[in-house]
Image (tube, grey):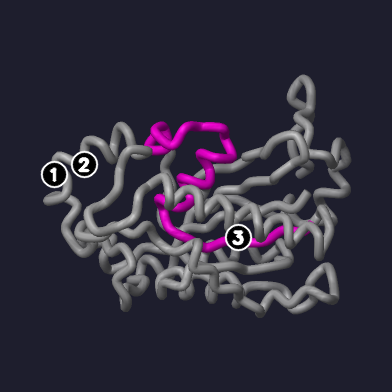
Amino acid sequence: MATVILVRHGRTTANASGLLAGRTPGVLLDETGRAQAAATGVRIASVPLARLVTSPLERCVETAAAIRAQQPTAPFDPHIDPSLDVIDEDLTECGYGAWQNRSLADLAKEDLWTTVQTQPSAVTFPDGESMAAMQSRAVAAVRRHDADVEREFGPGAVWVAVSHGDIIKAVLADALGMHLDLFQRLAVGPASTSIISYGKARPSVPIINSDAGDLSWLAPSHAAAAGGPQTGDATVGGGAGRAS
């Protein structure tokens, strides 16, 4: 099975000022966000990537570029080109419609805010997208790329999808078997990594919202050395953990 590392973009000027940027063009990483993206690139550098997919919005493209810049020059498969970014519109930010570019403090006073917090499956943003539609297109995109990567590069391949907080939370909720109405229980910080392996029986989610630590155990050579089932089946009893 292939493995996807979901990466949220680094902090932006809008994040720092408390604005809901949405799909507004020209929202870039701030100094902190650039440092976060670079650090995430270093964390992933020991894992040769089969594919690097990103939302088309600038903050994600900047984050993807920081990850790509740290990739080794000799990937584990000679046919893999880690310099090739794939832009996927289905990984773009939720269409917040009339909420876009408004302050979060003001939005919290709206009646819809409570529904966003407690029943997101019932939310359609004014002049925008429904949260259910957001989850549907994002999950479909991630699963489509994952299947393509496994088919082309084999079950040991690892790839990255750079996207947005609500998008990643929605994809994680699907992988965890959570109803969309529970996805606000998840946290996905700027430049954080979350990992999903889509096995034959069920997805496995070993990491959520991580912003530190070595990821070399994801590299195909390390994963093969660790042994154990390669089918995605859960290890009865919990297993011995990752090889150090």
Of 213 and 99, the residue lying toward us: 99
Q: Amino acid at mark 1?
A: Glu
Q: Position of residue 176 (x, y in %)?
A: 57, 35
Q: Amino acid at mark 2?
A: Trp
Q: CA distance from mark 2 to mark 3?
A: 35 Å
Residue density around tag 3, few if under 14, some if 14–19, many if 20 or more, within 10 Å: some
- Image coordinates of residue 42 in percent, x first then y, are 59, 65
- Which quarter of the rendered picture does the C terminus lie within? top right
- Residue under pointer 2: 113
Q: CA distance from mark 3 to mark 1?
A: 39 Å
Look at the image and tell me whether residue 18 can be seen: no
Q: Nearer the viewer, residue 185 or 210?
A: 185
Please tell me which residue is depicted at 28% across the width and 64% down the height of the picture: 21
Judged left or right of residue 217, residue 179 is left
Magenta segment boundaries in residue numbering? 157-185
Of residues 166 and 124, the one nearer the viewer is: 124
Q: Nearer the viewer, mark 3 or mark 1?
A: 1
Q: Which mark is residue 110?
A: 1
Is the Cβ of the residue at disc 2 closer than 8 Å to that at disc 1?
yes
Q: Is residue 138 left or right of residue 235?
A: left
Q: Which residue is mark 3?
A: 43
Q: Which secondary structure lies at badge 3?
A: helix
In the picture provided, is 94 more to the left or to the right than 228? left
Which residue corresponds to the image point at 73% horizontal and 61% vertical from the top-left?
148
**Mark 2 or 3: the one toward you:** 2
Task: Describe the element under mark 2 as helix, strand or loop.
Answer: helix
Q: Residue at x 79, y 22 (%)?
A: 236
